[in-house]
Amino acid sequence: MTSTPLLNIEGLRTYFYSRSKQAFIRSVDNVSLAIARGETLGVVGESGSGKSVTALSVMGLITAAPGVISGRIEFTSGGVARNLLENLDRYVQLTEEHGRIMGVAKDAAGWRKNAEHLLGRVRGKEIGMIFQNPKAALNPFTTVGKQIAEVVQLHTSHKGVGEARERAIHWLERVKIDSPRLRYDNHPFGLSGGMCQRAMIAMALSSEPSLLIADEPTTGLDATIQSKIVDLLAELKQDIGITTMLISHDISVIKRLSDRVAVMYGGTVVENGPAAEILAGDAASRHPYTAALLASIPNETHVREKTPLLAIEGEVLDTINTPAGCRFYARCNRVTDKIRQQCERCEPDLREIEPGHRVRCWLYFD
């Protein structure tokens, strides 16, 4: 790993506008993340916490308005760092009240043109992505082999039809799909969910990217196939050493594959640090949300002693009406009288409590 992150996200905000409620949905709200070359960053959190929208923002695949409105996404390739949101402020005007964004005026056409110019050189080539639903992401009218070969021709030096075909088959073999030469000529509807996911992984890796974003790669698969996909990702990580941003609800997948973990809640990062430290069963220093999330995971004790699962109290945060204070305050069971007013009125910073371990919580402020 190097000291310079391969991907460095700072202050990213991605909003959507709800016409029915006449308000902004703050799906990603001031997210900062860094991924070092060669490491796997696991991103966890409840549905609606902003994990997938963060990934789609990095890829420039947000289509609903206003979309990305501020921030910096710095990607380092060939020793050169490029801001994938360069000159964003030229196309966006923000109206703020008391530090809160209340209005957004965006030149959507100018923004799209600028984004395509910047992202067209890295999307699919230097940054690959595995999507949640492989059958929906693959073109149903073209064979999976031709789709992979097209990526090979577009983003690698293998430009010939026959050469690209053999390269596509090589990647189908690499992801251990059954009968790769036969599967090359299959359409997505002729493959199982697990096979489609393997084909999607082969497509994402076929351009030999520097960064792989895996968005819920085991969602919708049965337990046996999930296990095989995780085994495959673990093997590819060891063999290729590709830098990965892994998004998953499954803590066991994150624990097995990740070097570092970022925990998201209500559109922002509430904790990040070494996976072994944050996910350890006896960890003393962690965000109350992280602790509650880990406590809600079923284990052998629940089965053996027939004890009920520990659910997180309250409702998932409404990102339209985010509070002025801590976003987890209404559901937190560790609030003390000493910090209650701070929790209610002011959102804490993401502060380092140990080397490489940052937490957004007033409990850890001196």
Image (cartoon, grey):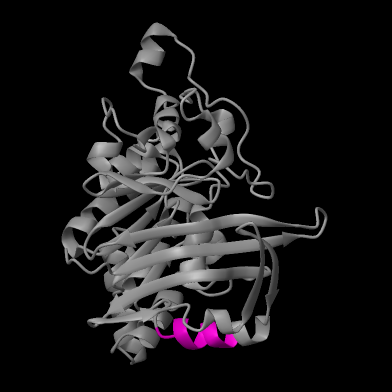
Instruction: Give the image location of residue 304, x and y in percent.
Output: 36, 10
User: Which quadrant of the structure image shows residue 363?
Assistant: top left
Q: Could one spot residue 231 in this view of the protein? A: no
Identify the residue shown where x is 66% and y is 43%. Answer: 318
- Give the camera-side residue of 1 and 345: 345
The stretch drawn in magenta includes residue 86: no
Q: Could one spot residue 351 in this view of the protein? A: yes
Instruction: Give the image location of residue 17, x and y in percent.
Output: 72, 62
- Give the camera-side residue of 126 and 234: 126
Look at the image and tell me in which quarter the C terminus lies: top left
The stretch drawn in magenta includes residue 120: yes
Identify the residue shown where x is 64% and y is 48%. Answer: 319
Main secondary structure along the magenta-highlighted residues: helix
The magenta span reads: 112-121
Point out the residue furthest to the right here: 20
In the rendered view, would you say 84 is above or below 258? below
Identify the residue shown where x is 55% and y is 32%. Answer: 341
Identify the residue shown where x is 28% and y is 52%. Answer: 232
Look at the image and tell me in which quarter the N terminus lies: bottom left
Instruction: Give the image location of residue 196, x and y in percent.
Output: 45, 59
- Give the camera-side residue of 161 and 87: 87
